Image: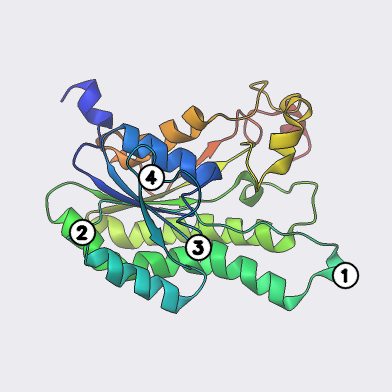
Amino acid sequence: MGEACLFSLAGRVALVTGGTRGVGRMIADGLENQGARVYVASRKAGDGELLKGGLRALQADVSTHAGITDLAQRFAALEPQLDILVNNAGVAWGARLEDVDERSWDRVMAVNLKAPFFMAQAFLPLLHASAATGRKAKVINIGSIDGLWVNAWETYAYQASKAGLQHLTRRLAAELIGQGIVVNAIAPGAFPSDMNRAARDRGEAISAAIPAGRVGTPEDMAAAAVYLASRGGDYVVGSVLAVDGGLVYANPGNMGSA
């Protein structure tokens, strides 16, 4: 097999939740550019220039089990199988310890941790249909480096949800690899977006703390997702890939404080 074939997604079908903007859009565009037929699911799937480049939009609310079930049923009416599931939809929220309320905590957990599990469950028949073709089906959960280390912000639910998602990734991987489904996670660092406004609005200052000397680009995120989604990533199972310019694992200051 040639190198080009290792990373080609031609003929593959992908679904990216929260794929209309930010990291999700970077991933959706990257998968589509490698030949995949990409659906993006979002509560605001009809907004903007979503269909530019051939992306297909599905409006859905994955924060509830009912919303996930409805999405899976509608998707099954469109496609006989799902080759690549990217659980990217996420919520970032923070408050002082004494101000954290139950409703906000539960919302973060529902979107960031509960939804990826029930998405994998709901789409399991379509993932099995993909694996039955002889190629590995892929599930990619989008975590965060905030699930790998403790940052300076009081985002208690967010950090806990991402750490939980990244461990859930390993448990799902252990269960599903024998069924021809490969599960991994990506832990993004500083990528400019509406969710990561610090990287968006203060990129120069943020870059000074990153060993690579810059914030992430759409190409960086797309490349990581394409690698895990493609044949090239078939032997990577249950891993959490930090895409952060070395902030967590190649940062002398971080290592010195451990």
Mark 2 lies on residue: 79
Left or right: where 251 falls relative to 31: right
Mark 1: give few (<14), some (14-19) or many (20+) Cα within 10 Å. Answer: few
Badge 1 amino acid: Glu
Q: CA distance from mark 2 to mark 3?
A: 21 Å
- The residue that disc 3 covers is 43
> Relative to residue 6, is residue 48 depicted above or below?
below
Query: Which numbered mark, 1 or 4, is in the foreground of this view?
Result: 4
Counting from the top left corner in percent of width and height, residue 91 is at 62, 59
The residue that mark 1 highlights is: 98
**Percent position (x, y) of residue 127?**
25, 59
* Image mark for residue 32: none
- Residue bearing the label numbered 4: 51
Q: Report if the CB atoms under discs 1 and 3 are less than 8 Å apart.
A: no
Three-letter amino acid code at disc 4? Leu
Report, in whole angstroms, how far the alpha carbon at label 3 lies from the one at label 4. Answer: 15 Å
- What amino acid is labelled 3 in the image? Arg
What residue is rendered at 69% in x and 70% in y? 105
Q: Residues within 10 Å of mark 2 (few under 14, many from 20)?
A: few
